[in-house]
Amino acid sequence: MAEIKLENITKVFKVQRRRRTESVVAVDGMNLKIEDGEFLVLLGPSGCGKTTTLRIIAGLETPTEGRVFIGGKDVTEYPARERGIAMVFQDYALYPHMSVFENMSFALKNLKFPKDEIKKRVTETARMLGIENLLDRMPKELSGGQRQRVALGRAIVRKPQAYLFDEPLSNLDARLRIQMRAELKELHMKLGTTAVYVTHDQIEAMTLGDRIVVMRNGKIQQVGKPEEIYHRPANLFVANFIGTPPMCFFRVKVVDENGIKFLFKNGDTMTAPSKFWEKLSKYLEDEIIVGVRPEDIKPVDRNDGALNVFISSSEFVGTKILVNFKIGEERGIMEVEPEKANLIMVGKSLPITFNVEKLHLFDPETQKNIGVD
């Protein structure tokens, strides 16, 4: 096990475009400390720099600036094979001409481990992963889930200081991804080894990570536990990226009418939570962005103190109904219990309320969460 630390990591690629060489910043001044034994997830959209960060930790990319430390040792100039890490790739990267046993033992053979030790490690790891009956098979004879377990096993037998995962579940179908997420979590609890996991899937991030690093355009947007990222997003990007269905956003004018209120585009008003009044005082007569999660929006029987919305469509998804609505021209979505389905009439208006204690308020210019210090 080992702590991993990134200090002022920047990675710039030179890209040829229309006979010109341009500089593309993939990672921009990253500082990050990954605790010994932690399962940390790098989350973000394609092109945000998360895989480049992982490759820099692995030694597959050299940072343009900054230093990499593993186990307290500066390994910035070390090649990948000397860093004591093991990497699991998206495409499994199994050798097609080798059996499962040979794939799992390949690295140990190269490191000149004794045959008895190799057999012991491979057998124990295969048993742990439930693939001990597959050791004689070839990769082409395996399912996607079995191939992924072999790839995990090949990493585990080395007993590295840290595991690096580059979107390892993205080639699996939805049901198998759920199963493998649970198995990865259990495996990490058994091994207790530091793990860094890259994904663009926020469900994977929320279920697997001890902490999540949300990235955008090469920069860290927020670092925190899953519940912190979900309930206290640092900015508009994080709030919009985390959550299924996503958070709803409405531009409102801040007005003072016997207390601070939000004026929506359709002319309806809502009293702002008193805990925000002091911070909102500097936005009087200006616009801010109000964010609210679909589970914090509820239909009501009466118009008193409610917002009137237009119902555009609804989707039954088993335990709830997802209802799409408009406030003026702005769209939102709410989760409704099936027993309240009689209130939902597509093409009609409906009074709704927000759980005002769970509203998120964002500055339109900085996009920062006003309520997060």
Image (cartoon, grey):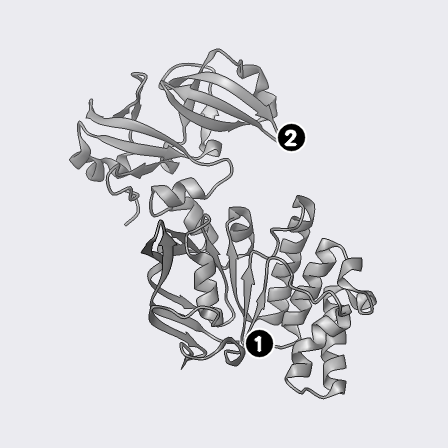
The label on residue 318 is 2
Whether residue 240 is situated above or below residue 12 in the rendered picture: above
In three-dimensional space, the C-alpha distance between marks 2 and 1, rounded to whole angstroms, equals 43 Å
Instruction: Give left or right: position of 203 versus 246.
Output: right
Q: Picture coordinates of residue 117 (x, y %)?
A: 72, 85
Looking at the picture, which amino acid does disc 2 mark?
Gly
For label 1, count other residues whose C-alpha is less than 10 Å away and answer few (under 14), some (14-19) or many (20+).
Answer: some
Q: Residue at x 34, y 48 (%)?
A: 234
Say whether marks 2 and 1 touch (CB < 8 Å).
Answer: no
In-front residue for pair 209/108: 108
Looking at the picture, which amino acid does disc 1 mark?
Pro
Q: Residue at x 43, y 14 (%)?
A: 302
User: Could you tell me which secondary element the residue under label 1 belongs to?
Assistant: loop
In-front residue for pair 163/371: 163
Instruction: Give left or right: position of 128 versus 311.
Output: right
Instruction: Give left or right: position of 139 versus 245.
Output: right
Residue at the disc numbered 1: 160
Q: Picture coordinates of residue 31 (x, y %)?
A: 34, 65
User: Could you tell me which secondary element the residue under label 2 belongs to?
Assistant: loop
